[in-house]
Each structure stands twice: as structure tokens, then as C-alpha cells.
Image (cartoon, rainbow, N blue to C red):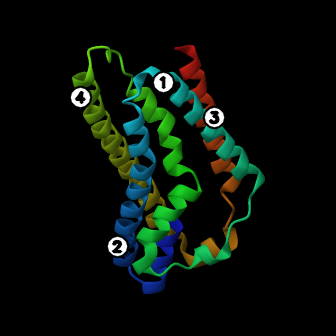
Amino acid sequence: MGWPLAVSAGLMERSPRALFAALGPLSVGHLLATLLMLLPFALLLVLAKWQHQISTFASLLLIAFGMFRLLNRRHPRALARIPPAQLGLWSFAIALAHGAALMLVPIYLGLCQAFALDTGHEAAGALMGANLGMAVLVAIIHVVAMIAAGGSMAWAVYRYLGLKFVSRSWFNLEAGWAASLILVGVAALAFNLAD
């Protein structure tokens, strides 16, 4: 969702460098929001005997948040003009508010299945360390994919379409985003219940 701000930065500065410079703070903010969502769940996985219930709750939470976003489509206009110095903070807040970071939780929980915790506290410590590493890996892979896709879109709009296209064709992505949250939540719930 941050690529339009990268386009805006490029257009305001009349420079592709400004567009690419905006991608850095957007990446950092999104990564921090993703880690903020994933790390608590990574710590919860130490309680492996409740892993199925935690996964089900995370899936239901994602579905509920998607439904909320689908029904509540208000989008604050103030978020459209963000100074370049505040892009990281904006990216962090929007990744939390729009559920981008939350979307990864059911996927992450599915990657971190705990199989042998009955060997004692040493196994729990090893599992926690592995799950924290997996949380960071999932967050980094997500941010790299998000910046590659969003940066490509921002560059294409900046380079080939320009400000007139953006001002004439601006559309609200909220319904599509809410539907994708619900879809990922339903898929994660189905996989979790199939176990």
C-alpha cells in the first residue's frame, strides 16, 4: 500500500532517486510492523501443547479483521500526504492498521509446527530459538517481496503514467485488501483444521 507514496515522493521531487529513496523507510516500517506481529506469536509457540488452538485463533482473528476492513471502508485523507522523513512511521502504522503484518501470522504458525516438546525444557528453548529465527526470516522475505512488487508498480506509474494518471484513476483498494485478508484467514483455518 506504500507504493503510491513512493510515486508521490518521486513526482514531488521530480526525481526517480526520491522514489527509490522512499522505498527504504517504507521497508523499515513494514518490517518493524511485521516483526511486532510475528514475534509475540513466536514466543507463544513455546506453549506447543496449545499450538492448534493458537493457530485457530490467529486464523479467526485474521478473518474477523478482514471482515471489519470490508465493512469499515473509511480511509483517512490525511494519510495521503506523508513527508519523506515520516515514511517509515507511516509504513509501520499502516502495516498494522491494514492487517498486512497480521496476515503472516497464520502462515508463520503453519511453518513452525512443534513435534517433540515432551523431551523437556531444553527442547522448548531450542524450539523458541528456531521459531524466532523463522519469524525473522518470514518477515524479511515478506518485506523483500512487498518492496519488489510495490517498488516496481511505483516506478512504472512514475516513469510511464505520471501524476495525471494517479489523480484521474485513483481507486480505493480497501475491498480487495479486506477480501485478501479473509481469504488467507480462511485458507489458514482450513489447513489448521485439516491437521
User: Which mark, residue 50?
Assistant: 1
| Along the viewing direction, whichever of 65 and 124 lies nearer the viewer | 124
Residue 188 is drawn in which quadrant?
A: top right
Residue 2 in view here: no
Percent across and percent down for residue 90 are 49, 69
The kind of residue tagged 4 is Ala
| Along the viewing direction, whichever of 108 and 145 lies nearer the viewer | 108
Crowding at mark 3 (Cα within 10 Å: few <14, some 14-19, many 20+): some
- Is residue 76 rendered to the left or right of residue 193? right
| Along the viewing direction, whichever of 161 and 103 lies nearer the viewer | 103
Which secondary structure, mark 2? helix
Crowding at mark 2 (Cα within 10 Å: few <14, some 14-19, many 20+): some
Q: Nearer the viewer, mark 1 or mark 3?
A: 1
Label 2 sits on residue: 21
Q: Mark 2 to mark 3: distance in Å? A: 37 Å
The N terminus, quarter of image: bottom right
Establish if 37 lies above or below 186.
Answer: below
Label 3 sits on residue: 60
Crowding at mark 1 (Cα within 10 Å: few <14, some 14-19, many 20+): few
- Is residue 34 rendered to the left or right of residue 103? left
The residue depicted at 62 percent of the width and 39 percent of the height is 61
Label 4 sits on residue: 126
